[in-house]
Image: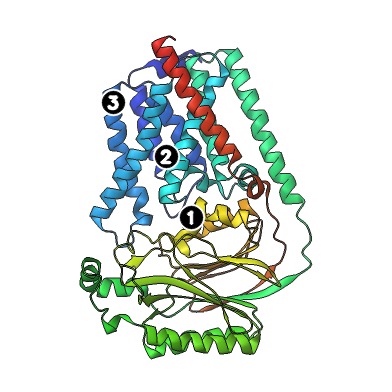
């Protein structure tokens, strides 16, 4: 123990901690994630940040830029080096802000309450970032495979899991700060251990008490033949011109061919004939001009009415309204009687879409079907807590999510969708044109799955268990987050009082 104390006080230790912390980050932001490193990264980085001098934070920022460029490759669709650098800088800025803010608030203390400062401010900043960029990349996402811990999200949301990880790092620092004296070691480990064991017990109980499902519904996803990424590569110059001049006529070569439309309609009819009562297309299954769209809707109405099924079609359309950009990313739900139930426009276009795609109004469509209350968002929308808060308030039971991923990001994005479904207790039908199609139950378990990168099949069938039930988190919302933010604000007040002694 004495050797450990000496080692920690050695000047070289903070650089070793910085290096180990940043190396750990590399294993939690890529296509394959290793959850244990999510615990190690903040543990080491906190050891650095609380011992480092102000100018040494430049070293932290530099290392985080490098880590960000590497780990954010999964978000860099075309491996553009400029986009990669921008992603790295944003990643470094956010993470440096967490540790720098903690350093400004940090007061050396023997009080155990001090261990709650770092996790509270980390959650506060995490919530701010997710409101702007979505939940992709937050620490808790790496813990989905740690199933008992993942079930904590049904009470606190996923930010509660991040809190536990950051709190562990804070307790280890508190113990080391107090020279590993037995009182502090015992108190820190006993308190954290008791809470952590309680969380795991809750998770195991919830996993073991899953109720028997009495009713199932046959559903299907239909992945379209339209290759959005290939279009982006082939027509890069034309797309850039569209972004600069939205009034420019969309080249006819952009629109889906008659063959592609015929294939998509044929597969949709095949799914309906098989008995699927909800059919979901992937995001941008087709790119249609207004004449093509009218024809497609007419055909889908016939299929829906003939086979008494709901069909959610999703597509890019040539904009015909006064909206400023040339393309809309939309979905339309056709009801069992062949009428239009709703039209929805993607609320959060990705950065790649923003120059040419109009944003929607961020209001979720709702329909009470005989199978439960259903709603719809499109791909990236499902990463935003504000939209999903609406789904919780409106008691949505089945969420239909057309999506379009890419190979590096597809596994991570699919896990994120599972996590959201677990924490809310609803059901999910996620149709993907370039990634993982999945039907997921209320526990976040995959009922049926189809990976378009490893299969030539374009239709996924599944028997969806109709057992949606709102979780505690779905009912109470971000109460835990509010408590964290409140504690963070109190920490700022106490820090200011300590500095000015009033």
C-alpha gap between disc 3 and disc 1: 34 Å
114 and 36: which one is in front? 114
C-alpha gap between disc 3 and disc 2: 20 Å
Label 2 crowding class (10 Å Cα cut-off): few <14, some 14-19, many 20+?
A: many
Mark 1 lies on a secondary structure that is helix
**9 in relation to 194, above or below:** above
C-alpha gap between disc 1 and disc 2: 24 Å
Lower position in the chain sequence, tag 3 or tag 2: 2
Q: Which residue is mark 2?
A: 24
Q: Which residue is mark 1?
A: 383
Q: Quadrant of the C terminus?
A: top left
Q: Residue at x 75, y 55 (%)?
A: 210
Q: Quadrant of residue 375?
A: bottom right
Q: Residue at x 55, y 36 (%)?
A: 482
Lower position in the chain sequence, tag 3 or tag 1: 3
**Where does the image place residue 23, in percent across and percent down from the top left?**
38, 39
496 and 157: which one is in front? 496
**Where does the image place residue 40, in percent across and percent down from the top left?**
47, 35
Q: Residue at x 52, y 44 (%)?
A: 140
Label 3 crowding class (10 Å Cα cut-off): few <14, some 14-19, many 20+?
A: some
Q: Residue at x 29, y 71 (%)?
A: 232
**475 in relation to 450, above or below:** above
Label 1 crowding class (10 Å Cα cut-off): few <14, some 14-19, many 20+?
A: many
261 and 36: which one is in front? 261
Q: Residue furthest front?
A: 322
Q: Is residue 354 left or right of residue 183?
A: left
């Amino acid at each position: 123990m004495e050797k450990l104390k000496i080692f920690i006080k050695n000047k070289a230790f903070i650089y070793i901690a910085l290096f180990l912390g940043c190396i750990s980050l590399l294993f939690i932001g890529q296509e394959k994630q290793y959850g244990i490193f999510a615990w190690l990264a903040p543990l080491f980085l906190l050891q650095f940040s609380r011992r480092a001098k102000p100018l040494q934070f430049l070293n932290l920022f530099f290392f985080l830029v490098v880590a960000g460029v590497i780990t954010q490759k999964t978000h860099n669709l075309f491996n553009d080096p400029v986009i990669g650098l921008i992603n790295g800088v944003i990643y470094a800025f956010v993470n440096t802000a967490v540790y720098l803010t903690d350093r400004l608030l940090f007061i050396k203390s023997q009080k155990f309450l001090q261990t709650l400062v770092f996790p509270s401010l980390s959650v506060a900043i995490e919530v701010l970032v997710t409101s702007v960029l979505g939940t992709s990349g937050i620490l808790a996402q790496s813990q989905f495979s740690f199933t008992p811990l993942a079930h904590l999200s049904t009470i606190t949301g996923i930010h509660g899991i991040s809190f536990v990880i950051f709190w562990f790092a804070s307790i280890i620092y508190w113990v080391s700060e107090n020279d590993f004296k037995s009182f502090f070691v015992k108190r820190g480990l006993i308190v954290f251990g008791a809470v952590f064991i309680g969380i795991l017990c809750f998770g195991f109980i919830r996993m073991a008490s899953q109720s028997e499902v009495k009713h199932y519904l046959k559903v299907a996803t239909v992945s379209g033949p339209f290759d959005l990424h290939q279009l982006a590569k082939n027509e890069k110059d034309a797309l850039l011109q569209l972004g600069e001049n939205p009034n420019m006529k969309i080249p006819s070569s952009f629109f889906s061919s008659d063959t592609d439309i015929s294939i998509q309609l044929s597969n949709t009819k095949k799914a309906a004939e098989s008995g699927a009562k909800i059919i979901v297309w992937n995001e941008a299954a087709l790119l249609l001009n207004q004449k093509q769209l009218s024809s497609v809707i007419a055909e889908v109405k016939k299929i829906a009415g003939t086979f008494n099924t709901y069909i959610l079609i999703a597509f890019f359309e040539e904009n015909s309204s006064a909206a400023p950009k040339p393309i809309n990313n939309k979905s339309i739900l056709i009801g069992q009687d062949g009428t239009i139930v709703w039209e929805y426009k993607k609320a959060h276009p990705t950065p790649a879409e923003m120059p040419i795609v109009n944003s929607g109004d961020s209001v979720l469509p709702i329909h009470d079907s005989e199978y439960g209350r259903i709603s719809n968002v499109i791909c990236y929308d499902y990463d935003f807590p504000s939209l999903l808060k609406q789904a919780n308030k409106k008691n949505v039971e089945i969420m239909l999510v057309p999506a379009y991923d890419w190979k590096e990001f597809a596994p991570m994005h699919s896990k994120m969708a599972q996590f959201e479904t677990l924490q809310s207790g609803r059901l999910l039908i996620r149709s993907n044109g370039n990634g993982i199609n999945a039907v997921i139950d209320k526990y976040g378990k995959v009922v049926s799955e189809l990976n378009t990168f490893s299969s030539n099949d374009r239709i996924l069938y599944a028997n969806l268990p109709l057992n949606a039930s709102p979780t505690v988190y779905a009912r109470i919302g971000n109460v835990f987050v509010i408590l964290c933010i409140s504690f963070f604000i109190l920490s700022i007040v106490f820090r200011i009082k300590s500095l000015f002694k009033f």
